[in-house]
Amino acid sequence: MDVQHQIDYVVRQGKIENGPKRVLIIGASGGYGLASRISAAFGSGAATIGVFFERPAMKKRTASAGWYKTAAFTEKAEARGLYAKNINGDAFSHEVKQATIALIKEDLGQVDMVVYSLAAPARQLPDGAVVRSALKPIDEPFVGKTIDFNTGELRSISLEPANPEEVADTVKVMGGEDWELWIAAMLEAGVLADGCITTNYTYLGSEVTWPIYYHGTIGKAKEDLDRAAKALNVPMTQVSGKAHVVVMKGLLTQAASAIPGMSVYLSLLFKAMKRAGTHEGCIEQTTRLFATQLFSADDLRLDEQARIRMDDLELADEVQAYVKDNWSGVNEATLSELTDFAGYRQAFLELHGFGFNEVDYEADVDPVVEMNLVFGA
Ligand code: NAD
């Protein structure tokens, strides 16, 4: 249902002129990656290959949400006559990179866009060692509030600062190194088309979230994306291509739900943006990115780090003023009045496939749903 709503939105916006035709999405089964895939396929008729790490159903145990979303996307894309194939495996691994390159060579020849939209808690290195990302502040402890999803109660949270190893590990997992490895392997294999672009999504957010986000371990990893984009722009000249870091708005995705303290910010943000009539979800963001920035004749809206800014509406003065003015006033008594916790909660349910009126949750269904997988189980 979530996938159908996203497709409907893209179709309503009309064709993305000069949009991409052959797209690889790494991290294609949720949040911004899935939305990018839907914008490319249903907005500009692109053939898509999706790479992701999802759990299929086992006997009576259901598959992960991203599995069902990808199966639904694939079925709907194929029904439209669009090419859509999937690779389920660890994108950090050499095997998955090589399987993806082989598939591109065999089926598409080359791709003209690579979306890198991975959000992973850990990365296995070639020697077998596993490094984990930590969502922690740096230098100063973080003290904040979080909303209990079920009861609406506010709880205090405090986190000690990360040590240097945790910072380095987070950069290793969520920084730009693996993006560079993918592009290097694809350039070497000759599977990037002339004029190919590659994107990686980042978040800066509001100053109220900087202590845990932008000035924290994850912010260091995001800074590394800026470095990687600059570095990639050198080899990308071989195909007259370009690497872009794109700043997206804060939204509730699987990855975002793991960030401490984001629930208060996002609930306030949703309230302020809905009030201003500027609220967007992942699909609105990626479709606007494609139509008005990446594939538009207009100049790119870049900041001083050459990042494309899609967080313009989140950072609008009136929106941020609302968030800051009410930041310390959020408590259990004021939650439903000051924030859009109801909308935040609904977004959380939808993320996992719940909360859709059209769905009969009592119906007996088979949890096993097959999809067109080229690699992985
Ligand atoms: P998400 O959790 O919804 O999606 C993550 C994707 O990565 C999924 O498809 C998952 O299967 C895949 N993945 C994770 N580990 C993998 C692995 N080892 N191998 C293959 N695939 C793997 O996350 P999201 O919020 O859409 O995040 C995507 C990117 O957008 C991240 O870089 C994130 O920082 C960025 N971003 C998110 C927000 C936000 O508010 N959610 C805002 C700005 C930028």
Image (cartoon, rainbow, N blue to C red):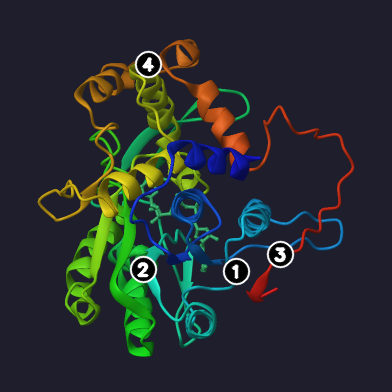
Residue position marked by numbered label 3 in the rendering: 371
Is 286 situated left or right of 323 in this image?
Answer: right
Mark 3 vs ligand 1: CB under 8 Å?
no
Cα distance between the residues tagged 4 and 2 = 39 Å
Is 216 in front, or is 69? 69
If you read the primary sequence from the N terminus, does the residue marked by circle 1 or circle 2 appear first?
1
Crowding at dot 1, Cα within 10 Å, few <14 / some 14-19 / many 20+, comes out as: many
Quadrant assignment, res 174 = bottom left
Residue position marked by numbered label 1 in the rendering: 86
Q: Does residue 234 sit above or below 280 in this rendering?
A: below
- Residue 169, numbered label: 2
Amino acid of disc 1 = Asn
**Quadrant (top left, top right, bottom left, bottom right) of the N terminus:** top right
Q: Tell me, yes or no, if residue 162 can be seen here.
A: no
- Residue 275, numbered label: 4
Instruction: Give the number of the mark in front: 4 or 2.
Output: 4
Cα distance between the residues tagged 1 and 2 = 29 Å
Residue 75, x across and y down, in percent: 68, 56
Could you say whether the residue bearing mark 3 is in a helix, strand or loop?
Answer: loop
Amino acid of disc 2 = Asp
If you read the primary sequence from the N terminus, does the residue marked by circle 3 or circle 4 appear first?
4
Amino acid of disc 3 = Met
Is 286 situated left or right of 85 in this image?
Answer: left
Crowding at dot 2, Cα within 10 Å, few <14 / some 14-19 / many 20+, comes out as: many
* Marks 1,3: beta carbons within 8 A: yes
Q: Does residue 224 sit above or below 101 in this rendering?
A: above
Quadrant assignment, res 368 = bottom right
Q: Residue at x 39, y 64 (%)?
A: 116
Is 189 in front, or is 108? 108
Q: Residue at x 47, y 21 (%)?
A: 340
